[in-house]
Amino acid sequence: MLAKLNQQAAVAGAAALRKHTHFLFILPFARELSRAWPASDVLATLLARRKMKAGELGKSPVSGNLKDGALASWIMLEPKKTVFEAQAAVRGALQSLLAENPSEIALVVCGDESQRRRAAQLAVYCAWVNGVALPERKKKPARKPLKAIHLYGHRDKDGFAAQRARAEGNVLCRELTMLPPNELNPATYRECIKQLAKEHGWRREEYDYARLKKMGAGAFCAVAQGSESRDAAIVHLTYTHPRATQHVALVGKGICYDTGGHNLKPARYMHGMHEDMNGSAVALGTLLAATRMKLPINIDCWLAISRNDISPRAYHQNEVVRALNGTTIEVMHTDAEGRMVLADTLTLAARGKPDLIVDYATLTGSMHVALGDRYSGIFATSDELAAQAVAAGRAAGERVCAFPQDDDYDSALDSKIADVKQCTLDGEADHILATRLLKRFVGATPWIHVDLSAHSSKGGLGAVASDATGFGVGWTLELLDSRRI
């Protein structure tokens, strides 16, 4: 539940400054302080004590107490800052306030109308995504949720509906990703999705293991067969709009736990593998946000939900499996399960003939090696689509980097006994080779593959302060919105 928002078009006066206990002041960039800004005298004293110039607030926030004892934080927004940089600056200024677990917070934006609008959008969104209490299992939870946000200096007629929808989608993504694997397994995940579908009016269809086996989805079933409980499934959710201008399919990898299978991961690399379902959480979070925004787009959401367990029934190296579209795959490594479950899920998505397919997956370690955890990598079926994706990342503050996927990479996946190898054993350019494999299952449909190297970043990323970032929800919304123009 996001905090309730109260808006006041007027900048906070003396009465408002006495009313609240925690304030964030967002100022336009300036070399000198303006007396018109609330609590400017207090800020001047704090800057003098720290021997700082006013313009330095554009690089580092300052915190201190107002005359009545309220805790306040000040930040200046430099006009040349990127969206990512501006989000990170606001998030940093909020942290000292939220660390005290306030039930309410006051946001005060200053400057001209355009400056106040931009500052308000950033501040409200950052307060919403960081003011929630995320899953933790302690006797005394470290965080209490923010109950109310009081905004002074700007009033949005829609109540920041777009920012609220994006925040709700981001929070859902992070909440699901952070759940421990004994709480979120394929069966409980499917039940959770069932409840979400009922709540939001999505049409739902499940392709369980038995149905997929009968259909010939050998790639998905090869991974799912290793689990003791045959609770894996591909779940299809549908959102429609009466004035839809395009049809998009969102596909998410939902491996609730990844042991690596018979190619068992060592402890260091198995730790955190409950987050291997993050791609499906991004797709779900995006679907929720699009629904809240009532986007005029028809959306099919396909979630490949399974575990990659080790057992006598688990699939082995050297097996040859037949995917749903008839392609035979030589299994090279059982820890390359993500591309297996996605292969059949992408086939189903492509059969719906959407205008665009976007898939999300925590797919390869090589992408993390290439980019670290501050960007995610994308692959697109055209240069134009890749440019749209990169531009959407800049606009959303969720940065993506486009990678090549030229045809000659396919030679590395040549197999003597099947149509294609699942991967190679040397790992070279695995993020590219995984994409070349997946491309065989989308046909001629325009397609973007997102390798979510930024799904988790220690200390937070951009607007989000938690290690789990919810990366991808904001980017997708921006991409879909830009394609409607």
Image (cartoon, rainbow, N blue to C red):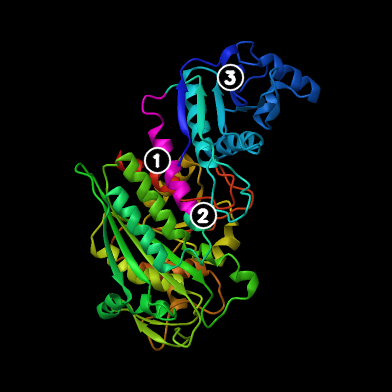
Q: CA distance from mark 2 to mark 1?
A: 22 Å
Whether residue 363 is visible here, answered yes or no, is yes
Task: Describe residue 50's horizontal placement relative to residue 35 as left or right.
Answer: right
Q: Residue at x 29, y 53 (%)?
A: 198
Q: Amino acid at mark 1?
A: Ala
Q: Residue lying farthest left?
A: 242
Q: Which residue is mark 2?
A: 376
Q: Amino acid at mark 2?
A: Ser
Q: Which residues are magenta?
A: 156-175
Q: Which residue is mark 3?
A: 19
Earlier-in-chain disc, 2 versus 1: 1
Whether residue 450 is visible here, answered yes or no, is no
Circle 1 Cα neighbour tier, 10 Å, few/some/many (<14 / 14–19 / ≥20): many
Q: Quarter of the image containing the C terminus?
A: top left
> Dot 2 lies on which element?
strand
Between marks 2 and 3 in the image, the one whose residue lies nearer the viewer: 3
Q: Which residue is mark 1?
A: 165
Q: Amino acid at mark 3?
A: Lys
- The residue closer to the viewer here, 36 or 399, is 36
Counting the numbered discs, the total is: 3
Q: CA distance from mark 1 to mark 3?
A: 29 Å
Coordinates of residue 6 in the picture (x, y in percent)? 46, 25
